[in-house]
């Protein structure tokens, strides 16, 4: 969706998702320099926006990682189905087979006989064996990976290799510690890969993109827009994403009692599982459904605009229907967050 006439940030209804175009483009360029072309398989779950994915593809990253069947469907519909990895277990792959029939390349992660059977029944022709490298989530035990690969080949599907996501390490504060533990996880993945075979070793994320040198492709997603949690973990990318809010109430300081202000960016406009958002120059007190209460700094007035920095990018974006690309006070474009839902 392109902005027909020039619009200004001041005219947007709030809460509104804003992307600082310069910061976003710098993040994409920096990552493309670090992990060129197929070394990065960007994860679309972070932004759920095919227009944004098209920008990543234009920089040479033509394969993508998806978390849901819906994301795969939307990427194919947007003409970005050259090489999609559904890096997640599904027990109903029936919507994927017709996309494969129509020419999309779709690889699905499997970690059990049941998920393998679902992939085969759904018409999927290529799988990766998902290996548990230490995050207690999906993934087969490394020593069982070869067995599942054999079962897959016996079922007539191609096994492209392995994936293993070291998600428990993304926010480890000390980079040296993060790197050491990543190496341990990847030793498990490489041992599984020796049994499984195939060309692909997929893993990693924004927190380990620079230190995970064992995978053939990194599945980072958050790097494009960033959040305060990843910034606090020392990642070099810029915070491109903010939620624009309006101050709807302000209480002046009285005697010893501090003043505070309230913006219309509540927890229904923010992913909160990594904690409170930040308001530059102020201290956030708390969020409720439709309110963000903050104090400190110079007291704002009713009607002032605030830029709220989310603590977690993925669940924040999933709450919004669109994102506005801005430079300064100009809205240059508006992208639909079209991969939402299931
Ligand atoms: N790969 C998988 C399977 C994930 O679930 C995630 C995020 O949770 C990532 C990679 C990395 O994403 P990010 O770069 O946003 O940390
Ligand atoms: Mn995340």
Image: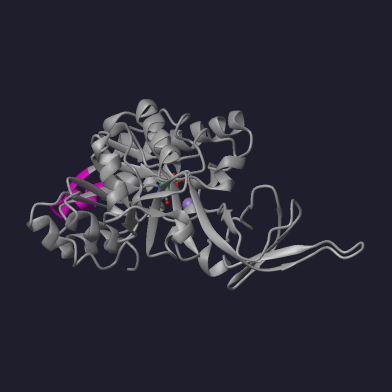
Q: Residue at x 46, y 48 (%)?
A: 329
- Most extreme residue toward the left, as rendered? 102
Q: Is residue 225 visible?
A: yes
Toward which corner of the image does residue 41 lie, by quadrant?
top left
Task: Identify the residue shown where x is 63% and y is 38%.
Answer: 173
Q: At 75% from the left edge and 63% from the top edge, which residue is drawn? A: 260
**Residue 331 forms part of the magenta stretch:** no
| Above or below for 120 versus 186 | below
Q: Residue pushed farthest right?
A: 255
Please state if 252 lies on the left or on the right of 117 as rendered: right
- The span shown in magenta is 149-159
Q: Position of residue 214 (x, y in %)?
A: 40, 29
| Display coloring | one colour
Q: Is residue 328 left or right of residue 85?
A: right
Q: Quadrant of residue 181?
A: top right
From the viewer's side, name the closer residue of 32 and 115: 32
In the rendered view, does 265 fall on the left or right side of 113? right
Q: Nearer the viewer, residue 119 or 51?
A: 51
Q: Position of residue 98 (x, y in %)?
A: 11, 62
Residue 281 x, y percent position in the rendering = 69, 47
33 relative position to 149: left or right: right
Residue 155: within the magenta? Answer: yes
Q: Quadrant of the N terminus?
A: bottom left
Residue 147, position as x, y percentages in the image: 29, 48
Task: Establish if 126 lies above or below 176.
Answer: below
159 and 338: which is toward the camera: 338
Quarter of the picture holding the C terminus: bottom left
52, 295: nearer the viewer: 295
């Amino acid at each position: 969706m392109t902005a027909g006439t020039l619009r200004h940030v001041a005219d947007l209804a709030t809460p509104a998702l804003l992307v600082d175009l310069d910061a976003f483009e710098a993040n994409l360029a920096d990552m493309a320099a670090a992990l060129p072309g197929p070394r990065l398989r960007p994860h679309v779950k972070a932004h759920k926006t095919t227009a944004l994915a098209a920008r990543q593809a234009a920089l040479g990253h033509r394969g993508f990682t998806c978390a849901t069947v819906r994301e795969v469907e939307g990427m194919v519909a947007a003409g970005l189905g050259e090489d999609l990895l559904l890096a997640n277990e599904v027990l109903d792959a029936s919507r994927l087979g017709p996309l494969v029939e129509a020419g999309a390349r779709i690889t699905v992660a499997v970690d059990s006989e049941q998920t393998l059977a679902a992939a085969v029944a759904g018409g999927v022709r290529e799988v990766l064996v998902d290996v548990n490298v230490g995050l207690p989530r999906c993934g087969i035990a490394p020593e069982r990976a070869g067995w599942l690969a054999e079962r897959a080949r016996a079922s007539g599907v191609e096994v492209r290799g392995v994936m293993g996501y070291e998600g428990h390490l993304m926010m480890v504060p000390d980079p040296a510690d993060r790197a050491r533990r990543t190496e341990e996880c990847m030793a498990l993945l490489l041992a599984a890969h020796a049994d499984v075979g195939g060309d692909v070793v997929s893993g990693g994320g924004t927190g380990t993109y620079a230190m995970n040198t064992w995978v053939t492709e990194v599945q980072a997603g958050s790097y494009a827009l960033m959040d305060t949690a990843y910034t606090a973990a020392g990642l070099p990318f810029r915070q491109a994403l903010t939620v624009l809010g309006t101050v709807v109430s302000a209480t002046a300081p009285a005697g010893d009692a501090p003043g505070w202000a309230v913006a219309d960016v509540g927890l229904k406009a923010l992913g909160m599982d990594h904690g409170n958002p930040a308001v530059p120059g102020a201290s956030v007190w708390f969020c409720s459904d439709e309110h963000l209460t903050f104090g400190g700094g110079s007291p704002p007035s009713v009607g002032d605009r605030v830029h709220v920095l989310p603590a977690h990018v993925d669940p924040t974006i999933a709450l919004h229907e669109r994102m506005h690309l801005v430079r300064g006070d100009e809205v240059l474009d508006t992208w639909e967050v079209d991969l939402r839902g299931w």
